[in-house]
Amino acid sequence: MTNDKTIHVCQNRTCRKQGAKEVLAAFEALPVSGVTVKGSGCLGQCGNGPMVLVLPDRVWYSRVHPREVPLVVEQHLKHGYRVIQMLYYRFHSQA
């Protein structure tokens, strides 16, 4: 099962102030086969959250809002396409 993915949603102080608890709940409300959703400790990108890290893809999404979670689920988790406009600029080129 090498295609399994894990979604890490930062639940540290700054991300929680920015709505990470609601983002985590939104992912949990849309389960996808082969995908595990976890609240994580600090992902080290404070001030850019809520941060979401998709492993093993090593894809980072920043400033994620609960209303955007269905797009990530449908586009990335179900079909394998990154949501370009949500990628975290420090780790992903916007080109």
Image (cartoon, rainbow, N blue to C red):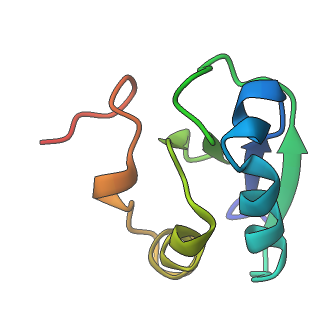
Is 50 left, or right, of 85 in this rendering? right
Q: Quadrant of the N terminus?
A: bottom right
Residue 90 found in image quarter: top left
Q: Is residue 26 above or below residue 7?
A: below
Residue drawn at the location 74% of the way across and 37% of the way down: 17
The x and y percentages for residue 43 are 71, 24
Q: Given the current orientation, which residue lies at the most extreme left position?
A: 95
Q: Is residue 19 above or below residue 49?
A: below
The x and y percentages for residue 63 are 50, 44
The x and y percentages for residue 68 are 51, 69
Residue 70 found in image quarter: bottom right
Residue drawn at the location 83% of the way across and 67% of the way down: 25
Q: Nearer the viewer, residue 4 or 51?
A: 51
Total tally of numbered discs in the picture: 0
Residue drawn at the location 87% of the way across and 52% of the way down: 38
Is 64 left, or right, of 10 in this rendering? left
Residue 95 found in image quarter: top left
Is 41 left, or right, of 63 in this rendering? right
Residue drawn at the location 56% of the way across and 23% of the way down: 47
Q: Nearer the viewer, residue 35 or 48?
A: 48
